[in-house]
Amino acid sequence: MLAGLFLLAASPVFAHPAPDGFAKLAARLSPAVVNISTSQKIEGDLPLFPKGSPLERFNDTFGRGQPRTENSLGSGFVIDPKGIIVTNDHVIKGADEISVTFPDGTTLVASVVGHDAATDLAVLRVTPDGDLPAVPLGDSNTALSGDWVLAIGNPFGLGGSLSVGIVSARNRDIQSGQYDDFIQTDAAINKGNSGGPLFNMDGEVIGVNSAILSPSGGSVGIGFAIPSNLVRHVVDQLLQYGHTRRGWLGVSVRSITNEVAQTFGLDKATGALVISVTDGSPAKKAGLETGDLITRFGDDVIIDSRALTRIAADSEIGKTIKVHYIRGTKPAVTGVTIARLQEDEDNLSAGKKTVQGPVAGRVLGMNLSPLDKTLRRRYNIRSNVSGLVVTDLAKGSDAASKIRVGDVVEEIGWTKVVTLDEAINRVAELKKSGKGPVALLINRHGELLPRALKF
């Protein structure tokens, strides 16, 4: 009797037992997951490399005036049988042509409905002969650490690949943008999985695979997916407007420590501390000041600064929302009428996400920043790479069609550059000499690429 009681007490009870296999689920979901291939034409206006240079062998390949094509691969999934597909913005960014290949081998040309660099999401449209297999977006808030997940995608061009794992963590901030709120998973995610779906065991998409943390460039069991609740909000706006319409409060905020919380009469660190208020902003008009601690925004309790940034961005433009805050130790409430974040239009027009490093300068149409730990992590740049990282590109510049945000400029005019002054001075020297275009050596995820930019 005692032995029986012991065995009964020791036997674990699982609310969500491990499945016997994933074959039936994969067979049902795979038809809606697609491979995405893009091509981009690059003008071949490179100057000849100096005789004796290690790069001299590229002269035959990259002769003057010879255009070339760059290709990339990614994944996506159908959310509407009529031909609406979701993927990552970085998969299709700068593409001249986009092709979507389905598991049955059918290939269709896709057009871009809209894209959002801030959340790394894009919506494509294809025109099929009939209805396509589609998958639903689920509720990512119900995904718990330890839940089983299934990733389907196109890693390294191997279409229709499956990997299985669990939700490792929620609400991850990987320093890729101000709206970071990733689902972390140990399901194998590699290059080419970008834009593919992360499914729960009900066959619902709870995330869009977007990034990995890896010193080698391959999967080490740390992958990140954009939660489906954020995806749904962005996709709805892209389908309705062709771009995002984010709310704007007009404050810069940061999270607080437990020690700072005590000065506001709180037992633990919570809320978003206002460190600056933009003149003429909704926050300024509502009377918010530097030093105020925002604790609630409408119906939402503000846990930290990231929470306020996301909630304010998702707010309805023109709506007046009650903001609860503490000034000194006195609680107060004010009404803030949400305005539209105009920076979104500027970034959309440029087709690039504006990210400034600690120090940045414009050179040849590129915003360049010296590498530091934050930028290396943001753009997945290895510690042995030196140079200046590209954080933004001027619209219409020669660089905009040849360089990508996240590229590292190692050399300008056959000279290594690691500081902004070195880059600026070298370009000035070359411009004064009357020679052009300017030869650059770019490091793109470990691959050295020659480029040339016009003054």
Image: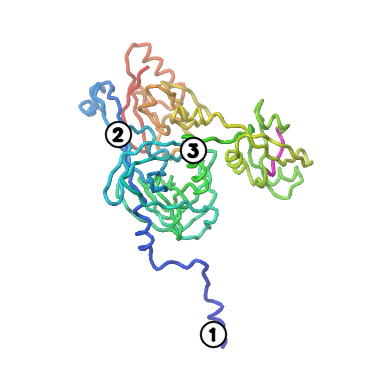
Confirm or deny contact between disc 3 and disc 1 (CB under 8 A).
Answer: no
Q: How far apart are marks 1 and 2 (CA)?
A: 67 Å
- Using the image, tell me which numbered label, if any, was put on residue 240: 3
- Residue ranking furthest to the left: 60
Residue 420: give x, y in percent of width and height. Answer: 46, 24
**Residue range (magenta):** 290-296
In this rendering, position of residue 349 left or right of residue 52: right
Residue 28: give x, y in percent of width and height. Answer: 37, 58
The mark nearer the N terminus, 1 or 2, is 1
Three-letter residue code for mark 1: Gly
In this rendering, position of residue 258 left or right of residue 165: right
Q: Which residue is drawn at 76% across and 38% down?
A: 327
Q: Mark 1 points at which residue?
A: 4
Q: Mark 2 points at which residue?
A: 70
Q: How far apart are marks 3 and 1 (CA)?
A: 62 Å
Residue 373 seen by the camera: no
What quarter of the picture does the N terminus occupy?
bottom right
How would you rate the neighbour count of disc 1 (Cα within 10 Å): few for under 14, some for 14-19, many for 20 or more?
few
Three-letter residue code for mark 2: Glu
What quarter of the picture does the C terminus occupy?
top left
In this rendering, position of residue 37 left or right of residue 396: left
In depth, the one of 202 and 213 nearer the eye is: 202
